[in-house]
């Protein structure tokens, strides 16, 4: 009997993979029809998508962009002989700027637009670490240069335009001429770096309200000087009085400035140099401008507040702890609508008539408090997820409480909480539409005002669709950014 | 600075609150604008055009008062209010006058401490049904499904009406007028009930308005009027007599076009007194002699305002009905200017 070997001794030549597993066909097979159940689900989904689109597309592709009223839309659609009607886009054509800006005076609308674009310039150094300083300053000059065309022409503006244009050209030239590595080399050799773009971010905090509400430039300057006063007091007193005492004194000094000296200062400076923008009343704010103003400020303010509250809740100091717990539980136990009603009505009754406590400011404060309570719990979740070893390691290194938080605990806890933080942000941004209930004209409130116009009475889906699209753009960007951030901060090796 | 003002103001709140409320006229004059509360949007009554200019039947009252007091119908800060915020806005002094299709009821007048200065529109709750239903009277609606806004007096009126007539119905609760309209068109209910003016405005937006009828029964009284705070009678008088001047102007045939001719003097002493060419009525109100002239010029007399915003030539197409002058079979009746 011959000895048969069942083991192959030589390699088979490599062959192409079967046609059915490569290319489009393979992808479809793998992803859409790999099994009976998945095939059924795919077919059902496709049928559903087809059903939706077959209704939506004929409706939305509608030649009504130029119509001036609902009846005109109907005439246009009737002339085309459609059975099921179509969208009436004339309302968007006529009112889109109102949905964006509310009743903000038309000739001043360059101001919110500029504020909006500067917001990105101010946020980029915080949000992304891949953009160089030069790029960031280039961006700022670019935005300012663009804005200078929106302002009406005067001799001064021409000069400003030329200056901005030249510096734009120069910055662009240097950015193009030297790439990142060359620049790093230059800096190593002692070339002067551009100032940190975070300075602009700090300035933006005071610039934003001034651009939006207008008025004298000295009010935001004076408000900013308060921080300078506090900082100077701290620097001068720290060597003499010690850290804690000088911190307290610095806070007092800043408080004295804000409460007592700010009035005379602005009065004096207004007398010396009356520079300012035309004031715009809060009542004229509306649409996306209102939603974004409330949303952005409340988002920016609620994160630090939330972190402080979360730390307070985990603190060993009894009073701090119970204050934080009480605040968080109270705010979370009350619907946002209730807080908004408090802002718009109760405060109104408690305060004497004629007191000028801005309604938007009141709403922003309430929205911030509301979001910060939720934020505190999200951050506390992140803190709780950290192994105790991290705390002990920080202690073992000899770091004090704040250093441990700043260097060891918070970077990890916040990283864990990113999805929760961003969904709180998104929720807060969408909650801004609730202000329509207290009579502020956010996009939803404006849609009912627009419908009250006899020409557009009866239009629903077009307006809601447009508003939904606007909100979707912003919330989608936020969620994409959070995913980017998670990728960037990922330190595991999976 | 805002903060210091705020803190200081709080401490003197008690003192200021009393005195500030008592002199609305002075406040308005010092401010140079009238703060007027209107609806955030009600077809024909208050709406803003694309440049943010407010117009409508209620808005016209604000403009007339501003013209009478300040001489400029544009000197109005319109404060959009919702059904929930309107009374607080007025009570807190945020607005000087509320012209927002508000029904004059005892509890609002007495308990909420407001003063209605008159009625600028007599409304009432009605029913809207499709013509193909073949119903000609609300009493034939036995067993019908009815769309109704929750939390309003219309809900209670409806229950009363059906109980009094011993017929049954099935309510379909909805939240807003827009939603009601959609539900009604989609056929979720046989009938839609709300104020007749609202029904007319809704019907005007349908693709085929003639396919729907408003039934003849009006089952409630909804006298809508502007109101001010209790306690400042001088200001209430100004608002009341401005409204009366608009109504009287229609009665005596004073229009925005012929008012300049009439200012030269007429044979009718009542007209002369309204226009201030005779007597000192303006002075009694704390205004000048031309106050009513400016109020009428602002948007025309009551009839002109009605025709322009909600009358039969507009898409809303409301007939005068109860809101005709008393001489024409309505109940609009201005007190004499004497």
Image: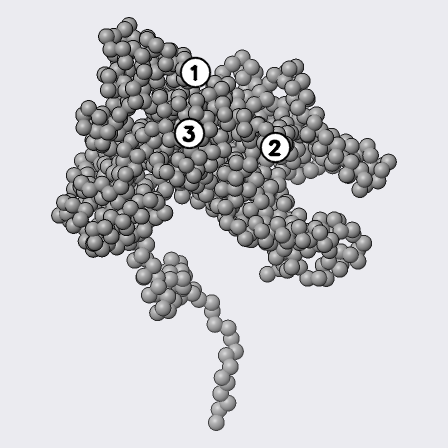
| Residue at 36% from the left image edge and 28% from the top image edge | B117
Q: Chain of mark 3?
A: B
| A297 sits to left or right of B272 | right
Q: CA distance from mark 3 to mark 2?
A: 24 Å
Q: CA distance from mark 1 to mark 2?
A: 31 Å
Label 2 near label 3: C-beta < 8 Å? no
- Place of residue A184 in the rendered image (x, y in percent of width and height, measured from the top left): 69, 38
| Circle 1 residue | B286
Q: Identify the residue at the far top of this view.
A: B264
Does dot 3 land on a helix, a strand or a loop?
A: strand
- Image: A321 above or below A465: below
- Mark 1 or mark 2, whichever is nearer to me: 1
- Mark 3 or mark 2, whichever is nearer to me: 3
Q: Chain of mark 1?
A: B
Q: Identify the residue at the far front of this view.
A: B338
Q: CA distance from mark 1 to mark 3?
A: 17 Å
Name the N-terminal-most of marks 1 and 3. Answer: 3
- Place of residue A320 in the rendered image (x, y in percent of width and height, measured from the top left): 70, 50
| Residue at 42% from the left image edge and 29% from the top image edge | B228
Is residue A194 visible in the rendered structure shown here? no
Colour basis? one colour
Name the N-terminal-most of marks 3 and 2. Answer: 2
Which of the 4 image quadrants contains residue B244? top left
| B2 sits to left or right of B57 | right
Quarter of the figure that contains the N terminus of chain B: top right
| Circle 3 residue | B228
| Circle 2 residue | B10
**Neighbours of disc 1 within 10 Å: few (<14), some (14-19), many (20+):** some
**Neighbours of disc 3 within 10 Å: few (<14), some (14-19), many (20+):** many
Is residue B38 visible in the rendered structure shown here? yes
| Residue at 35% from the left image edge and 35% from the top image edge | B104
């Amino acid at each position: 009997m011959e000895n048969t070997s069942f083991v192959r001794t030589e390699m088979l030549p490599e062959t192409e993979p079967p046609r059915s597993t490569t290319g489009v066909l393979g992808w479809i097979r793998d992803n859409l029809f790999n099994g009976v159940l998945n095939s059924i689900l795919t077919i059902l989904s496709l049928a559903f998508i087809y059903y939706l689109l077959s209704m939506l597309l004929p409706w939305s592709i509608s030649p009504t962009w130029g119509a001036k009223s609902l009846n005109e839309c109907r005439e246009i659609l009737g002339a085309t002989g459609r059975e099921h009607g179509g969208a009436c886009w004339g309302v968007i054509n006529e009112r889109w700027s109102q949905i964006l800006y509310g009743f903000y005076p038309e000739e001043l609308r360059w101001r919110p637009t500029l504020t909006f674009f500067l917001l990105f310039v101010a946020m980029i150094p915080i949000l992304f670490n891949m953009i160089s300083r030069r790029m960031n300053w280039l961006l700022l000059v670019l935005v300012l240069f663009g804005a200078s065309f929106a302002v009406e022409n005067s001799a001064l503006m021409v000069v400003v335009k030329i200056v901005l244009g030249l510096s734009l050209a120069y910055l662009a030239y240097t950015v193009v001429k030297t790439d990142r590595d060359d620049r790093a080399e230059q800096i190593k050799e002692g070339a002067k770096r551009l100032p940190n773009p975070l300075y602009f971010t700090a300035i933006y905090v005071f610039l934003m309200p001034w651009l939006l509400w207008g008025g004298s430039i000295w009010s935001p300057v004076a408000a900013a000087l308060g921080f300078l006063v506090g900082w100077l007091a701290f620097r001068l007193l720290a060597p003499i009085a010690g850290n804690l005492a000088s911190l307290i004194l610095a806070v007092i000094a800043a408080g004295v400035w804000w409460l007592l000296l700010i009035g005379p200062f602005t009065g004096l400076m207004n007398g010396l140099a009356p520079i300012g923008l035309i004031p715009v009343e809060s009542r004229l704010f509306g649409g996306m401008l209102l939603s974004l103003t409330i949303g952005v400020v409340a988002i920016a303010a609620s994160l630090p507040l939330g972190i402080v509250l979360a730390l307070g809740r985990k603190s060993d100091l009894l009073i701090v702890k119970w204050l934080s717990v009480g605040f968080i539980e109270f705010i979370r136990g009350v619907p946002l609508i209730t807080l908004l009603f408090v802002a718009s009505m109760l405060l109104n009754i408690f305060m004497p008539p004629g007191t000028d406590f801005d309604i938007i400011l009141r709403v922003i404060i309430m929205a911030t408090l509301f979001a910060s309570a939720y934020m505190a719990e999200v951050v506390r979740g992140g803190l709780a997820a950290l192994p105790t070893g991290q705390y002990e390691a920080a202690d073992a290194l000899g770091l004090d409480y704040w250093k441990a938080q700043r260097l060891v605990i918070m970077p990890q806890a916040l990283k864990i909480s990113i999805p929760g933080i961003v969904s709180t942000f998104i929720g807060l941004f969408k909650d801004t539409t609730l202000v329509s209930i207290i009579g502020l004209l956010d996009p939803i409130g404006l849609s009912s005002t627009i419908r009250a116009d006899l020409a557009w009475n009866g239009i629903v889906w077009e307006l809601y669709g447009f508003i939904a699209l606007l909100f979707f753009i912003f919330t989608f960007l936020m969620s994409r950014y959070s995913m980017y951030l998670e990728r960037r901060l990922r330190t595991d090796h999976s | 600075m805002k903060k210091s003002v705020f803190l200081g103001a709080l401490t003197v709140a008690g003192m200021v609150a009393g005195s500030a409320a008592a002199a609305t006229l002075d406040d308005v004059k010092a401010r140079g604008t009238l703060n007027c509360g209107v609806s955030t949007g009600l077809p024909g009554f208050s709406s803003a055009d694309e440049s943010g200019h407010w117009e409508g039947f209620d808005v016209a009252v604000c403009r007339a008062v501003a013209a009478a007091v300040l001489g400029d119908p544009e000197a109005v800060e319109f404060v959009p209010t919702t059904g929930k915020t309107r009374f607080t806005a007025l009570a807190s002094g945020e607005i000087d006058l509320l012209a927002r299709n508000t029904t004059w009821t005892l509890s609002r007048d007495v308990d909420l401490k407001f003063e209605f200065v008159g009625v600028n529109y007599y409304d009432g709750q009605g029913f809207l049904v499709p013509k193909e239903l073949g119903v000609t009277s609300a009493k034939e609606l036995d067993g019908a499904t009815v769309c109704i806004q929750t939390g309003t007096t219309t809900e209670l009126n409806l229950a009363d009406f059906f109980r009094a007539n011993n017929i049954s119905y099935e309510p379909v609760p909805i939240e807003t007028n827009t939603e009601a309209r959609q539900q009604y068109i989609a056929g979720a209910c046989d009938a839609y009930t709300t104020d007749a003016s609202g029904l007319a405005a809704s019907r005007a937006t349908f693709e085929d308005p003639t396919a729907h009828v408003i039934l003849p029964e009006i089952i409630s009284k909804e006298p809508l009027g502007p109101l001010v705070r209790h306690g400042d009678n001088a200001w209430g008088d100004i608002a009341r007599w401005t409204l009366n001047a608009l109504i009287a102007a229609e009665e005596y045939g004073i229009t925005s076009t012929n008012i300049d001719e009439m200012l030269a003097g007429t044979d009718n002493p009542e007209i002369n007194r309204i226009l201030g060419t005779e007597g000192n009525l303006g002075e009694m109100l704390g205004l000048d002699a031309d106050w009513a002239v400016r109020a009428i010029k602002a948007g025309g007399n009551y009839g002109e305002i009605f025709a322009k915003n909600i009358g039969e030539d507009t898409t809303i197409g409301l007939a005068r009905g109860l809101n005709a002058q008393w001489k024409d079979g309505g109940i609009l009746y201005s007190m004499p200017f004497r």
